[in-house]
Image: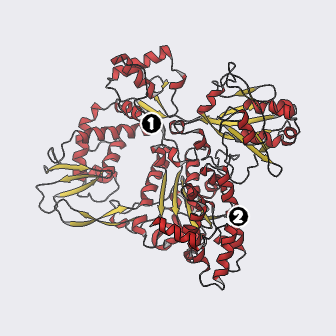
Amino acid sequence: MAIPKLKKQDVIDALKFIDENGVPEHNTSVKYVLVSENGKKYPPKYVVAVADHLANGADISTESFNSVDAKDYLENMGFVIEEKQQEKYMLIITAESVSSTDERFTMDNLSLGDNYKPLDAYFQKANGEIIRRAYSKGEKRNSNLTLPRLACQIFEKQIAALSVEEKESFPVCRYNPNREMICGIYTSVEEFKKHRNTFEHMDYSYDNGRMFVIYSWNTFSTLIFVQECLKHFGERGDQFVLIYREKDEKETVVSEREIASRDDRGQQPAEYRNPYSSMLIESKNLIFRGAPGTGKSYLAKEIATDIISNGYEDNYTCLTDEQKKQVEFVQFHPSYDYSDFVEGLRPKINDDGTMGFELQDGIFKKFVARARKNYEDSQKSRETVEKEVTVQESMTEFFSGVEFGVDTFKTINGNEFTITGVDDGHIHISIPGNASVNRLALSLDEVRKMLESGQKFEKIKDITSFFGKTFATQGYSYDFAIYKAIKAKKGTVSKAKAKQEELKKYIFIIDEINRGEISKIFGELFFAIDPGYRGKTGEISTQYSNLHSDPGEKFYIPENVYIIGTMNDIDRSVDSFDFAMRRRFRFVELRADERLEMLASLENEELEAEAIRRMAALNKAIAEVEDLNENYQIGASYFLKLKTLDFDQLWTDYLQPLLQEYIQGMYDEEGIMNRFVRAYGYQKPARGDANEAAQDQG
């Protein structure tokens, strides 16, 4: 993606141009905004395009770069870019009118529905009673089809009672006043296609196989149909409510069918769409248990996405890179341990080529550090945040101007040293004149705290007193020298503008949590992860705290960290799952017949229905085996393999080996397996067919 070469003044001129001429509807931003000094907000992509037009005479076009490119480019120029908070809109349909909290909405341009994604839909009676869609097995949640299906559900008897002529003339959609009205409620997809040969339709099943089929495409395409239902069959005061939002950039390049197939379980009374999201927020720690293939791992990511996006997304890939930092995923296994999870000594190659060890944080401790920083920063005032940002910019400017290994500095005692590198936590220095210790790793945080304090440090004793130490450490003299060097250069950095940090939620997912040796992995963290001991009340010293730069440093898990675990009930390691850990998690069972909506991603309704039928029959046969139970049943995620396999291949390559493992050693293994075969509907090839197949493969 190519961003044009621009100067800062070109961007300032572009802002003036936009102030005078406005922003076209299709160029409004859905993700980021540039915030000017006077508080006005502008879409970054359009700003860059206008600046290119003014500076280079190019057409105003945003097609050659994306919003992230524009954001990064403008931030590097010194402009303030904020992530735009997506807004939810409420559309109310009555017999008399259709209105929305989105000022851009109009019934004269229903094509705008291509730009929006539904979040919730419900019917509200005049007395205040609310009715939501009674989803059928495998039905997509909160798709573009939910609102018209809800209307069919509410007025099913009245619609069914219409004559054939009344059904065929029933108004459904007119995108604008210049287009024809699309009409018709049909009894089958085949009948619908005789009048309109397109896959853009909604079907509603009722009364043992009977069906309503109408035209349906985008979020607004059935508003007229729903309003006509109210006009014909509703009572005074009845209304339908649709909650929706703008699609983000990634969604706009995906077809509406693909988007609908990813829709979640349905909007809850809280801000989240997934019912388990609120459960996690309440409990802090949640474990999904159940039969294999019930989609536990996928559900965990759905929940994390739902919470991180505040109910706007249900697909992890739609999160921004910044939002993805709030989610971490790990899978436990028998050799996983404390050093992987919390902290441990890891081998490293020293600068002189020798082998050594250094203390490194594990994946969970790194994750908690991000959450903890956000939690602590959210408690700070705007003034404090601005001071910290100014200090960070001063340090960044200083170190970017240092030629590592070349530029020399002097301590108060005259010892010369060079800075050889800077990483996230340390300033690495070389001390040529020191025969005993010629290299040191100074704490970057110590220098930062000295600068942020606003205090004047005149001698080493001031630093010792500031950090509450009785004696100075070897590094303090070098800290002091770097502190003075940064202060001397600090005048070139103006006071930064910053906003108060927003408190965010962080979700840590542990897949197959029971496969690891829990006590070996968590160690003393058993106490810290307890929901009742979040925050500093649950702070602990980790096993390697004596090797920390500050041995007195305590570890705790802040209030904004939530943990999801998954486990298969039939895994033998479930029996040995630590009881101390069980007390700290809320356990939720997922049955094999739950979450069938994931099969909607097969994008073939007949295939989906057949998969559900075979799965139900097979699971019934499994439950009838004396030594098995529902924990051994087959979940829907196995049937997602039908995207590339047929039913027979799914059986021979996946299901049959699993079931054979289940019944191994049981009385009448062959008889049990034959019952499974019949229930599933697998047709064993005749010997001749098998030989021919083998020859074909050869």
Residue 629 visible within the image = no
Please give the label number shown on residue 616.
2
Q: Quadrant of the N terminus?
A: top left
Inspect the image, locate mark 1, and give the three-letter code of the amino acid beneath it. Answer: Glu
Please give the label number shown on residue 383.
1
Q: Position of residue 40 (x, y in %)?
A: 49, 23
Contact (Cβ within 8 Å) of mark 1 with mark 2: no
Q: Quadrant of residue 648?
A: bottom right
Measured along the vertical axis of the image, is residue 233 above or below residue 420? Answer: above
502 relative position to 634: left or right: left
Give whichever of 548, 453 is nearer the camera. 548
Give whichever of 679, 682 is nearer the camera. 682
**Colouring convention used in this rendered image of the protein:** secondary structure
Inspect the image, locate mark 2, and give the three-letter code of the amino acid beneath it. Answer: Ala
Give SS at disc 1.
Answer: helix
Measured along the vertical axis of the image, is residue 476 above or below residue 230? Answer: below
Q: Position of residue 644 (x, y in %)?
A: 53, 56
| Sequence-earlier tag: 1 or 2 | 1
Q: Residue at x 48, y 55 (%)?
A: 328
Q: Label 1 to label 2, Cα distance in Å?
A: 61 Å
